[in-house]
Amino acid sequence: MKNHRFFTICLLLFLLLCSVFLGILFGSVTVRPSDVFAALAGKNTGSTAWVLITTVRVPRVLGGLFAGIGLACAGVILQTVMNNSLASPNTIGVNSGSGFAVMLSMLFFPANSPALPLFAFLGALLTTLAIYLLAALSDSSRTTIILAGITVSSFLSAGINTVKLLDTDITINLTSFMIGSLSGLTAAKLILPCAGIAAAFLVSLLFAKPLNMLGLGDDIARSLGLHVAPTRFALLVLSSVLAGCVVSYAGLLSFIGLIVPHICRRLFGNDARILLPASALLGGSFVILCDLLGRVLFSPFELPAGILMSFIGGPFFLYLLLKRKGGRRVNA
Amino acid sequence: MLEFRNVSVSCQRTPILNDISVSFRAGEITAVIGPNGCGKTSLLQCLNGVSKVTAGTVLLNGRNYLSIPLRERARNVAFLPQVRTIIPAIPVKTLVEHGRFPYLGFARKKSEKDVAIVERAMELAHVTQYANQSVDTLSGGMRQRVFFAMTLAQDCDYIVLDEPTTYLDLSGQRDFFSMIRELKHRGKTVILVLHDLNQAIRIADTLVIMDRLAPSPGVSKAENAARGFGRIAGVGAPEECLKLHLIDDVFDTSWKRFSDPEGDYYFFQ
């Protein structure tokens, strides 16, 4: 059992390394593997390939990696805290809330201002808390919460569109933002959000045990000595940092926060101590690979990563919806 | 000794109990009985903080229980709630290990002692053979045993179980009560909420009988609600309670006693 898990984790790590390598290697222009190794080793060859790798490909792949980590881990946390297997940053409207806040902030700040991730986080947090309170106070069924999330989501998307249409000065490609895309990422844009994601990910690992406790239900968690309300709040803040930071640079990537935790639950069970790192590995690979596919499939045209994710994620979500009947069976 | 002194209890801002005093003696098995809705669960839920104590004090061995931090409480009093809102899809062993949570810090890993306690808890609850099976694949009775094992893994001197026999069949109940006797034998204090009067009389050293509070006629509806819904109707050894007809009054029943060499049996109707 333990060996089997260890082996699977190694496999996921290998998958991630391959994805990173392939993500740097392929694109509208294919570079030589030796250039990739040279650039990764820190050798400045000054060639066109080197410039392309360091200024375009590496930021893009890193952006994908952190987007995967952020959304997948936010998904794990939300599913456990809300005890709802269908919860994820996308399905409960957190991404849209965050996106709306990003749009609002663009009215006042330039596109790579540090205010953007902050607004994205606040937008994510407010939406998360709103949906959580709705779920907790109304005692609604799990499917109802998801429906409420989808409603909130479309409401906020309308908000995003309105802001964009009313202020034509906003320098953002609305289509890519709404579907989620990694094109045009620069290192400067990434530093702050990625630092936020990395920090929140590490803190969430510390919270793995309390997260497991929450998965047992409030009354049992309390009987075991957990301060339920503060822990839950801390975890919701963490998930908002994770999702908000991703939205601030990659837009509304969908489904990753749903699919990846589910696959990892199948592979490793419901222990957050292993689920969080495993989801981070798989999430990172998944986003990088989707982005890569989008770049090479119809080259020289480029599909945003979010489109491929929706193609894969949409049917998967329907499958879950039908199979689990609102996720009654899950889980902790 | 676990002592409730003039305690008033609210659940989600609704007053449930008012000015209740009752104590649970150390080393004994105490059964709390009473009709539905008399506040048995609310009273005991003060111990894990699900219901709020609005007045009075709770003392654990003379110490103010409510000022003890949650984690330390969970090392002294193990409380197993009645309702299972969530059946976790995790292996039995992992669930039982969660019973060690109050002893583990953020960084502290489980020690050999923790492992030994978890194994002993699983043995005592007879769930060792299911260690690697997922809890949600087990039957209701087996799940109850697994949660019971988790409670035992907390290794507390006080064990409080809210309607522990609900999900158990006859042999399950028999096994369960022999486990409870074994716990008493090991010096534990056990508090049980039970519905089966026969079981309560046979297992308990002391009965705590609770009753619904009848609304007083001359008082407004709001005042009646503020007085709560339940009261302590009597406390004593089962024999005493039967003799004083406390059970008869509260449950509106009568009983017959049958004796054979193995003991007394009661028939309630």
Image: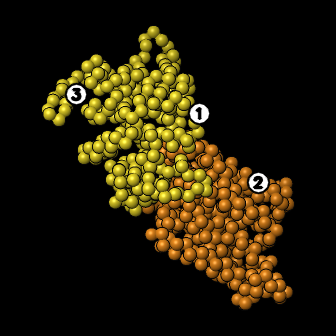
Q: Is residue A147 visible?
A: no
- The orange-tinted chain is A
Dot 1 falls on a residue whose secondary structure is: helix
At label 3, counting other C-alpha atoms closer than 10 Å, the crowd grade (few under 14, some 14-19, many 20 or more) is some
Residue at left offset 45%, top offset 69%: A1
Residue at left offset 82%, top offset 59%: A114
Q: Which numbered mark, 2 or 1, is in the foreground of this view?
A: 1
Discs 2, 1: same chain: no
- The yellow-tinted chain is B
Measuring from the top left, give residue B3's x and y in whole percent. 47, 27
The residue beneath circle 1 is B67
Q: Quadrant of residue A9?
A: bottom right
The residue positioned farthest toward the top in the image shown: B218
The correct choice, above or below, for B53 with respect to A314 in the image is above
Is residue A69 toward the left or the right of residue B118 in the image?
right
Real-space CA distance between mark 2 and mark 1, rounded to the nearest whole angstrom: 40 Å
Give amino acid for label 2: Phe
Give amino acid for label 3: Phe
Residue at left offset 55%, top offset 63%: A275
The residue beneath circle 3 is B268
Q: Are marks 2 and 3 in contact (CB under 8 Å)?
A: no
Dot 3 falls on a residue whose secondary structure is: strand
Give amino acid for label 1: Ser
